[in-house]
Image: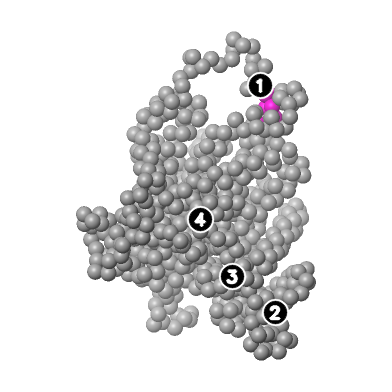
Amino acid sequence: MSAAVIFPPDQAPTTARNPSLATIAWRALTRKSGRIIGVLILLFFISMAIFGPMLYPKQLPINGANLYAPPSWAHPLGTDFEGTGVLAEIVTGSRYVLSAAALAALFTIAVGTFMGIVSGYFLGLTDNIIMRITDFILTIPGFPLLIVLSTIWSFGSPIAMGVVLGLTGWGGLARAVRSQTLSLRERGFIEAARGLGLSNGHIIGREILPNIAPYIAMNLLLSVTGAIYAEVGLFFLGVIPFQANNWGVMLNLAFGNGAMYTPQSLLYMISPMACIMLVTFGIVLTLDALDEILNPRLREG
Amino acid sequence: MKSLIPRLIRRLFGGIIMILAVASFTFFLIHLIPGNPALSKLTSLEMSGVQPRQAELEVSAIYGFLPHQPLYIQYLQYIWQLLHLNLGKSIMYAGISVSHLLLLALPWTVFTVTAGIIVSFVVGILAGVLIAVYRDRWFGNGITLFSTFLHGIPQLIMALLLAYLLTTIWPIFPYGSPYKASMTPGFTLPFIGSLIFHAILPVAAYAISSYGGWALTMKSSVVSVLGDDFILASELRGLKPRIRIGYIARNAILPLFTTLTLSIGFMFGGSVFIEQIFDYRGLGYMLITATTNLDYPLMAGAFLIITTAVIVANILADFLYTAIDPRIRVQ
């Protein structure tokens, strides 16, 4: 950190007095019981996505004699319109949903942060052009755009899905990052860095980026929820040919095969939706803890 | 009022540029679709023995351009047809013009989306005022928690849940069509009643999934207005609470109009799900059926109309805001 040049050594923050990041994180987590629950929910779904599909065969068995069965030991969440276990479908489907959402969030963050910082730091023509594009992207309704794009872009793999969601979803973040950069660039330490003749790359990478990193980390988690809705929605609408099972495909098949019309399909209909809501819930609760870990002002209280 | 006109012109100009950009996007999209549908249609017509001139006429009636000409000529042809409000002809509804199909679909979307925006706006503002007034009591905290939770649920899930729970598990509401199938559409009281009764669930799905945003914005807005000096002054002057609430509400609602523009796009985007789930033959429904049935002219047209509707609605909301808040006009 080049700020050390400005402060005399005895005023530089000492690591000995400050608690370590792990301690801070633990304190923030245990302050409210909801936060622990949130992290546990997320860990549960992440391990479901990683290890879950190993428990089941690649092709889930169908059973014509066991349609819309009530919960049993073999099928704890009952069965669907083909007699396949709902729990098996939920578990095997979680990997695609979560990996695509995580990739989408990464792409969104990368593009949004880059556009926002470049726009807010260089200003002038660059800023003008980037902000026009941002306005355009924010105006066009996202879902119709994704539907239309599905005709030329195959969304099948989690990576392809993540790229498309990232490229269409960065507008809001770019605007927010730009305004943060705008306020940072007028601050003394940035001016000092400029006065020292440091390169733009250094100022952006070493001075500005670390200062907005907490904000970006929060948005990373938040983008995951948006990406989950988007991909599940696309699969529900059936505009993407599906190669593997996931929660959106489950809802699509349930809707298309008349599960809407029978009360026996309650668990089959509710399970994927409940999972999506649980993941969202877990993310919101974790965000609350993350906010306190990353924002020193909240820690004092 | 003077600065209103240049502002209007600037906004309209920006809107036209944006619509043109979307039109260019749909033009190039049709060219990027694997297999070049326009060209292959032309070849297959010629192969089946149709006169070349006849085949060209047919393809250009469907897509709005001739696929074997240079790209810039195709582009100019396409834009020229759009300027004449000609969006080509549908493939799945053979021979029917896209603009006719979309004109039939438009009222359904405008009806449900407008009702959804109005209901969520009103409910959101009322909830926001309640939260702000009772913010230190369990009642206010309860509404806050409830609104935050509902705000996180996407329209797709809200619509599916409402449709499944309230028509199948507890059959309170009708499901599956915008009005009772046995009725003939017309301006009769029973028909309008049936229309409204069938619209309760879709409009509720729109409203419930977006009122939370209004409520939370309104709450912080009311709280900040409560701290203003003129509120203290009106209190000291001994004005009636009813009049003071009027002061507060009028000033607190203003910031919400900036959020309105974002909400319009969100609502039109959600129309895709709500129309699919509740079987409304609106623009979103057209977009989906056209995409899944490879009816590219209809798909491009529906996308263009949805985006245009959002852009126009944004300009209208902007003007509403300018008309209500005199402070904007000065700038």
Q: Kindly identify which numbered label has been placed on residue B299.
A: 3
**Disc 1 target residue:** A2
Q: Kindly identify which numbered label has been placed on residue A44.
A: none
Residue at the spot x=61%, y=48% of the render?
A: A171
Reply above or below: A139 against A258.
Answer: above
Indicate the chain on which mark 2 is placed: B
Name the element at disc 3.
helix
Proximity of marks 4 and 3: CB atoms separated by less than 8 Å: no
Reply above or below: A127 against A19.
Answer: below
Q: Kindly identify which numbered label has been placed on residue A157.
A: 4
Circle 1: residue type: Ser
Circle 4: residue type: Ser
Query: Residue reaching furthest top?
Result: A10
Identify which residue, A111 or B12, lies in the foreground: A111
Name the element at disc 4.
loop
Whether labels 4 and 3 belong to a single chain: the reply is no
Residue B235 can be seen in this image: yes
Residue B199 can be seen in this image: no
Residue at the spot x=64%, y=41% of the render?
A: A114
Answer with the quarter of the image where residue A121 lies: top right
- Which portion, as a residue range, is magenta? A184-190
Sequence order check, earlier mark of 1 and 4: 1
Circle 3: residue type: Met
